[in-house]
Image (cartoon, rainbow, N blue to C red):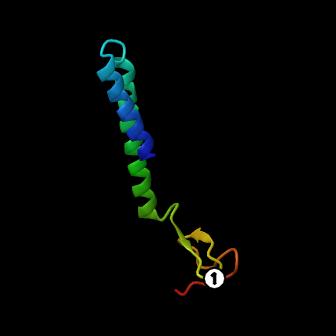
Amino acid sequence: MLTIALAFFLVGIILIVINPLFGLVPGLFLIVVAIVLAVLGVLAKGVGAAFGIGSQKRCPECMSMIPSNAVVCRHCGYRYPE
């Protein structure tokens, strides 16, 4: 999501620099959207890591990705030591 935000930011800057008269409003809009996307991306990554939401680990038996708070692999039945 941060790469999309960076792309929007750069396009907004380019619009403003190339045509200050007609590119100002769309350029500023893209810059604001980029800032919002960047903040949401950072918050989503931070909140997910803090609560273990969305984080995964790899099962040593079958190498499938499972939730990090899982005790038993749902694919092969491997039980993680506690």
Closer-to-camera residue (78/82): 78
Percent position (x, y) of residue 58? 56, 74
Query: Is residue 32 among what the camera can see?
Result: no
For this view, does 6 lie left or right of residue 77? left
Closer-to-camera residue (65/73): 65
| Disc 1: CA contacts within 10 A as few (<14), some (14-19) or many (>=20) | few
State the residue at coordinates (32%, 28%).
Answer: 13
Q: In the current view of this chain or complex, which residue is farthest to the front?
A: 18
Q: In the current view of this chain or complex, which residue is farthest to the top?
A: 21
Q: Quadrant of residue 21?
A: top left
Percent position (x, y) of residue 27? 36, 24
State the residue at coordinates (54%, 87%).
Answer: 81
Image position of 31 with respect to 66: above or below? above
Label 1: which secondary element? loop
Query: Is residue 43 among what the camera can see?
Result: yes
Number of callouts = 1
State the residue at coordinates (57%, 84%).
Answer: 80
Q: Quadrant of residue 45?
A: bottom left
Percent position (x, y) of residue 20? 30, 16
State the residue at coordinates (39%, 36%).
Answer: 34
Image position of 25 with respect to 31: above or below? above
Image position of 53 with respect to 13: above or below? below
Percent position (x, y) of residue 76? 70, 79
For this view, does 73 lie left or right of residue 54? right
Residue type at mark 1 is Glu
Q: Quadrant of residue 60?
A: bottom right
The residue labelled by disc 1 is 61
